Image (cartoon, helix red, strand yellow):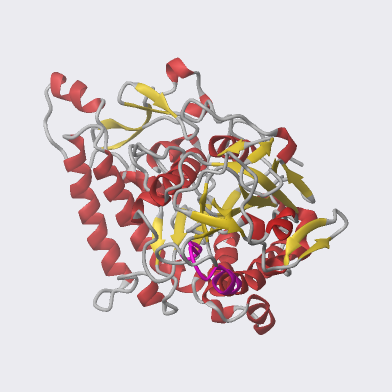
Amino acid sequence: MLMLTAHTLSMSFNVSRSESHRRSHTSFKDTFMFPLTRRELLRRSGCGFGLLGLAGVLEQADGRSTATAADSATNALAARQPHFPAKAKHIVHLFMNGGPSQVDSFDEKTELAKYHGKPLPASNLRTERPTGAAMKSPFTFRNYGQSGLRVSDLFAKTAQHIDDICVIRSMVAEVPNHEPSLMLMNCGNGRLPRPSFGSWVTYGLGSENQNLPGFIAMCPGGYPIVSTRNWQSAFLPGAFQGTYLDTKQTDVKQLIANIHNGRLSLEEQRRQLDLTQLLNAQHRKEREGDGRLEARIQSFELAFRMQSEAADVFDISREPQHIQEMYGSGQHGRQLLVTRRLIERGVRFIQVWSGAGQPWDNHSGLEATHKQLAGEWDQPIAAFLTDLKQRGLFDETLVLWGGEFGRTPVAELPSLNGRDHNHYGFSCWLAGGGARGGYAHGATDEFGFRAVENPVPVNDLHATMLHLLGFDHERLTYRYAGRDHRLTDVAGRVIGELIA
């Protein structure tokens, strides 16, 4: 039987930059017996079969991966080690798409009450649309925890965990527009097509469960603004793209299309898939470096294996009644309960969205809409953090809450009861996974418009989060179009004050 070699893209974080994209190889037996000339043998030896060896990583019944070097060479999602010991193993991104108001949630500004209904004296106030006078927050702020950090009543239950939350009050984005700001927050670049944060994380760490996607994006009711670009893999192999779930659906057969085959048994499907993968492998030999085919081979295997685990992980009726009640019966409670179950099973990156479109984009009716949205999130977030702590998962799970930007301290015309986009200064928070609890980093001006103390660009946030995952953000690279790319592009620094 002829022995050939298979290759995958080597991970740049384990080798020097000059060697970071050298191919790694593992041997296996060629399925087909074709007579080959010496020249043909040499040509094929550098080509390989992509991901045909996926079955080799399925040694554990629960799908957990204990990857060897050979596994990593044949399975893009095999679990891998970071550059240095990590504080976090998983990331959960609670995305409040549309832009929640920082001055109504985690950044109290008493001066707004003083100037309410009057023009602000700030001469550097620049907004996207015509705005009117100052608008005080309709919500009350209170001290919470031993740290005494002040949080509005919108998130009173979440604030019970404030001593374990790191509030960043000086986030800055680049422009006051949803599309580029979403791309910046998710992909590190607001203009060019780049891999998403979740794709970079799964590229670097793989997944601990080979029966589920390593990167999942949950958004009830359809896609958010700019659709699947929020979880794209771009020039990274397709295996690292996020898997979208419409969590408005509660039946697993509707949540995940075609999860059950009503005509063929698992044994019959396995034989069918083996033949398909055999043909794909032969096809792959003639097309070196085609990431689309590698992703197809991977996705076929994953789709087959998901049948055995997806029905269980997404069925929250299996949870005790008191746990279900703790999260609440709303869709965000369901999303976060499913998220905890996914973390338990080793899924690496989970993004949980507020919903389709841009729900927090309240140019009018801000008081009523923010109150409704926060009311839908507050109990589930508090329950999720409590649940992680009770199960010993909090310290290894890094949670990020926030939107793509914030909102202005002045009222927008003509409604005078909403706020415009504001990228000059806004808030987000981190919890768990090595983040510094009970701490507020940075500050905006006295009105909450512009970051004036320790501004935090999005690239710095990403660099810090990658550090908590055990990565040097400058070394987690991928060569494409003649240069090494990274999530933080040519910027980014680790902010040590955010780390416990």
* Magenta stretch holds residue 267: no
Give the number of callouts: 0
Q: Quadrant of residue 303?
A: bottom left
Quarter containing the N terminus: top left
Q: Residue at point 35% right, 56% down?
A: 227
Residue 6 visible, this orientation: yes
Question: Which residues are the magenta region?
Answer: 359-371
Rendered position, 216 above or below 256: above
- Residue 40 position, x and y percent, is 14, 24
- Residue 392 position, x and y percent, is 73, 59
Residue 436 visible, this orientation: no
Q: Quadrant of residue 84?
A: top right
Single out the residue that lies furthest toward the bottom. Answer: 321
| Closest to the observer, 441 or 311 | 441
Question: Is 213 on the left or on the right of 94, as rendered?
Answer: left
Question: Is 394 on the left or on the right of 119, as rendered?
Answer: right
Rendered position, 57 above or below 491: below
- Residue 377 position, x and y percent, is 60, 69
* Magenta stretch holds residue 365: yes
- Residue 204 position, x and y percent, is 50, 38
